[in-house]
């Protein structure tokens, strides 16, 4: 059974860089059938798509975050990662990693990682 | 960006009721619309994609339909497990966008 697990610091200082890694198990991140994505959810708010990556490294980003976000893939470790730089309190959220299947919907999700931006 | 507007924001209903949640897109998205269910403290779960196709393992009491840029999620007979927040998502074009959510509460 496919599983995704987010990992990374739960507390980041303002103006610093938020870094999270998603480890995929039970399946290969190098499958040609899937993209991999990041979505976030501020406390008590709705969902915001951050971006997607293919195993080849091809990326798509939300323009609202594009200038501050980098998504990368590490096929040797079956992982993909998210970096958001110059964070502020508005970046406080639960960050989810997820798989996009062929219809471009998110069919498998990680449990989510809460990241708080605070000094 | 394509705006997705869900209604209502909150819905109270009894077990056994038939309920409908609506999602309206600000422009045409063809049928590229998904519905997710989210319970407190959990990740969203995919219920329906391509407006009306049920994801594997999702009970048949869930159904989706479309009319132009208006999409509906219907639960034919509410079960206790269905009380959650529901989100629509368009994947017709980047950036993918979600509705603001509909919280389904027990009456």
Image (cartoon, coloured by chain):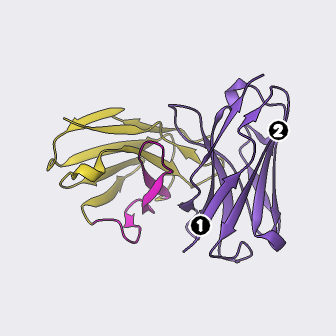
Chain colours: A purple, B yellow
Q: Chain of mark 1?
A: A
> How many numbered tags mark residues here?
2
What residue lies at 30% left-to-right and 60% top-to-bottom?
A: B63
State the residue position of label 2: A68
Counting residues from the start of the chain, the first of labels 2 and 1 encountered is 1
Residue A36: name its quadrant: bottom right
The one of B14 and B72 positioned closer to us in this rendering: B14
Residue A3: assigned label: 1
Q: Position of residue A83 (x, y in %)?
A: 81, 45
Residue A40 painted magenta = no
Q: Chain of mark 2?
A: A
Q: Quadrant of the C terminus of chain A?
A: top right
Task: Give the class, few, some or many, for how many residues have Cα within 10 Å of label 1's Cα (few <14, many ≥20).
Answer: some
User: Residue A67 location in percent, x, y?
Assistant: 83, 38
2 or 1: mark nearer the eye: 1
Answer few, some or many: residues within 10 Å of disc 2's Cα (few below 14, many 20 plus, some between 14 and 19): few
- For image coordinates 71% across by 25% down, the residue present is A89
Q: Residue B42's spot in the image, x, y percent? A: 48, 48
Tell me whether the residue at label 2 lies in contact with that at label 1, contact meaning CB atoms closer than 8 angstroms: no
Are the numbered discs 2 and 1 placed on the same chain, yes or no? Answer: yes
SS type, badge 1: strand
Marks 2 and 1 sit apart, C-alpha to C-alpha, by 28 Å
Please give left or right for residue B36 compared with residue A19 in the image. Answer: left
Q: Which mark is residue B7?
A: none
Relative height, residue A8 to residue A46 (above, below): below
Q: Quadrant of the N terminus of chain A?
A: bottom right
Secondary structure beneath dot 2 equals helix
Which stretch appears magenta? B32-59
Q: Residue at x 36, y 54 (%)?
A: B66
In the image: residue B12, left or right of residue A52: left
């Amino acid at each position: 059974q496919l599983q995704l697990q987010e990992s990374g610091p739960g507390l980041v200082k303002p103006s610093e860089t938020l870094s999270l890694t998603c480890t995929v198990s039970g399946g290969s991140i190098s499958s040609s059938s899937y993209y991999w994505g990041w979505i976030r959810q501020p406390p008590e708010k709705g969902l915001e798509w951050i971006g997607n990556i293919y195993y080849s490294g091809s990326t798509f980003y939300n323009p609202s975050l594009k200038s501050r976000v980098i998504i990368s893939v590490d096929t040797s470790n079956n992982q993909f990662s998210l970096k958001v730089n110059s964070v502020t309190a508005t970046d406080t959220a639960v960050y989810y990693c997820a798989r996009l299947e062929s219809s471009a919907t998110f069919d498998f999700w990680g449990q989510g990682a809460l990241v708080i931006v605070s000094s | 960006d394509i705006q997705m507007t869900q209604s209502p924001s909150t819905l109270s209903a009894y077990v056994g009721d038939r309920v409908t949640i609506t999602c309206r897109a600000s422009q045409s998205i063809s049928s590229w619309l998904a519905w997710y269910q989210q319970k407190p403290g959990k990740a969203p779960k995919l219920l329906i994609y391509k407006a009306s196709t049920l994801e594997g393992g999702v009970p048949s009491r869930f159904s989706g339909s479309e009319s132009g840029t208006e999409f509906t999620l219907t639960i034919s007979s509410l079960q206790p497990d269905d009380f959650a927040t529901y989100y629509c998502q368009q994947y017709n074009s980047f950036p993918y966008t979600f509705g603001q959510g509909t919280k389904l509460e027990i009456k």
